[in-house]
Image (cartoon, helix red, strand yellow):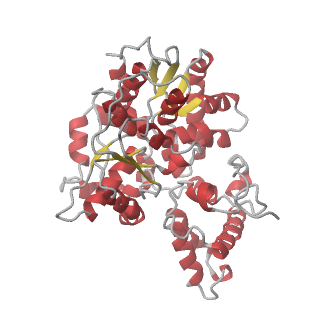
């Protein structure tokens, strides 16, 4: 046995096609094995609500050990996991290659996959994960959809809470009537042929959020890359499947992976890099899909070709060099490093990118926002999500910089709500941007 955390963590493929993966007795045995290790360590007590729930469950049992914990009582522990991967990536000393072989997030995923197979995931919850369908429908009547989902709407939000389980006060993303894919073809930016990186080509994987909710992120990305000589195309074959992964529907994720990999493969063959604008989507393409479909060469090829947008800009800066014209960002910026960006194991690329701006102080928050994708907006989770994100919101207010931005737009919205709750009458919350690339575009004098 070797001391934990001395080697880089490695992950095993997810055995979702093995019938034993869903066997309740085998699953319970693994839950108990892992829970006993966590019970004896407790290093992750302050990461999220899963671990306090687990430790309270054991401590308050008849014997204070796993033997008196009922198997059904593990469910609240599983429900509190946001699949952020931070315990695996940053805290746990027993992840592979340690012989304890502990992967807490993927164990929570396995539990949810068993629930999904047995029909225990609610109808409304499943419908919320169909982001492509929901985006297409909402785009057809965006003003009405945005009116109905506004958290200030006292008429529709209580109904949504009752029917869909979405907390009435949780901020939800707005929809656009003109998707990024559609609007990008109308007025493509002029590529700067004199830029040091001229000759690069990249496909922007639009993502559900970038396509249906906030095309501004995509247009800022295209404009910054065009300024730096990068020719871009925009595609959105399908959702990355992260919402389905959260619900344990691994088969649906595999279907999305095959579809997207098949469509992006020919672009890679033509010399295009693949850029995912959202960290959750980049994580799926880079890491989760190869674990779900380890023998699929198209998925492996896509994984190697994919970059996060901040990672890509930093790569250009270190390689060819950036185009001239960057100006200081008045008032400085605090950047929240999203968990799904940190889980990509690429370094703090958003902060590194913003530090390329001249005379611009950049602070960093490395605490979870508490949002966790769709998890944090649900009725049963919203207040817990705000509690988990409170240290990050408090730090954002304390930093007193003019701008606050998160790599994950949904995390940014959630942080903004947390800051509003913490701010007193004498405190003016900082301005929030929906993505670091938008601030980078502004430093170039680009408006989108």
Q: Position of residue 233 (x, y in %)?
A: 46, 19
Q: Is residue 417 left or right of residue 435?
A: left
Q: Is residue 105 visible?
A: no
Q: Position of residue 354 (x, y in %)?
A: 41, 39
How many numbered marks are there? 0
Front-most of residues 81 and 406: 406
Q: Position of residue 437 (x, y in %)?
A: 39, 35
Q: Residue at x 61, y 61 (%)?
A: 91
Task: Point out the image quarter for the C terminus.
Answer: top left
Q: Is residue 279 visible?
A: yes
Q: Is residue 263 left or right of residue 363?
A: right
Q: Residue at x 50, y 51 (%)?
A: 339
In this view, 272 is above or below 369:
above
Front-most of residues 235 and 84: 84
Spot the residue most to the right.
1
In this view, 45 is above or below 368:
below
Spot the residue most to the top.
193
Q: Position of residue 248 (x, y in %)?
A: 56, 51
In this view, 31 is above or below 283:
below
Name which quarter of the figure residue 45 lies in.
bottom right
Q: Residue at x 41, y 55 (%)?
A: 371
Spot the residue most to the bottom.
62
Q: Is residue 322 left or right of residue 72?
A: left
């Amino acid at each position: 046995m070797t001391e934990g955390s001395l080697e880089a963590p490695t992950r095993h493929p997810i055995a979702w096609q093995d019938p034993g993966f869903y066997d309740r007795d085998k699953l319970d045995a693994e839950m108990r094995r892992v829970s006993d290790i966590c019970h004896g360590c407790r290093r992750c007590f302050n990461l999220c609500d899963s671990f306090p729930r687990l430790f309270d469950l054991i401590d308050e049992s008849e014997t204070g050990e796993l033997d008196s914990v009922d198997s059904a009582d593990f469910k609240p522990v599983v429900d509190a996991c946001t699949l952020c991967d931070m315990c695996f990536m940053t805290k746990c000393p027993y992840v592979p290659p340690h012989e304890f072989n502990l992967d807490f997030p993927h164990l929570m995923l396995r539990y949810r996959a068993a629930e999904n197979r047995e029909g225990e995931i609610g109808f409304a919850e499943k419908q919320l994960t169909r982001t492509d369908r929901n985006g297409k429908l909402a785009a057809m009547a965006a003003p009405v959809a945005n009116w109905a989902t506004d958290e200030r709407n006292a008429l529709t939000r209580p109904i949504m809470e009752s029917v869909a389980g979405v907390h009435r006060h949780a901020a939800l993303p707005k929809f656009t009537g003109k998707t990024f894919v559609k609007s990008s073809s109308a007025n493509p930016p002029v590529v700067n042929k004199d830029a040091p990186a001229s000759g690069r080509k990249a496909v922007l994987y639009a993502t559900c959020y970038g396509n249906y909710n906030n095309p501004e992120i995509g247009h800022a990305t295209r404009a910054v890359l065009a300024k730096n000589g990068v020719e871009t195309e925009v595609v959105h074959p399908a959702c990355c499947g992260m919402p389905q992964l959260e619900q344990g529907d691994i088969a649906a994720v595999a279907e999305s992976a095959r579809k997207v990999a098949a469509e992006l493969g020919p672009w890679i063959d033509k010399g295009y890099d693949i850029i995912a604008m959202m960290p959750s989507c980049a994580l799926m393409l880079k890491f989760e899909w190869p674990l779900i479909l380890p023998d699929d060469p198209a998925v492996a090829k896509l994984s190697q070709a994919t970059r996060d947008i901040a990672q890509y800009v930093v790569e250009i800066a270190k390689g060819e060099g950036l185009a001239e014209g960057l100006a200081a960002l008045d008032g400085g910026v605090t950047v929240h490093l999203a968990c799904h960006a940190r889980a990509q194991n690429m370094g703090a690329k958003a902060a590194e990118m913003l530090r390329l701006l001249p005379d611009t102080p950049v602070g960093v928050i490395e605490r979870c926002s508490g949002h966790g994708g769709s998890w944090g907006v649900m009725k049963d989770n919203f207040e817990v999500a705000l509690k988990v994100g409170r240290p990050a919101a408090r730090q954002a207010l304390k930093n007193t910089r003019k701008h606050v931005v998160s790599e994950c737009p949904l995390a940014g919205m959630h942080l903004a709500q947390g800051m509003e709750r913490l701010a007193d009458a004498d405190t003016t919350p900082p301005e929030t941007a929906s993505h670091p690339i938008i601030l980078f575009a502004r430093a170039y004098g680009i408006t989108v």
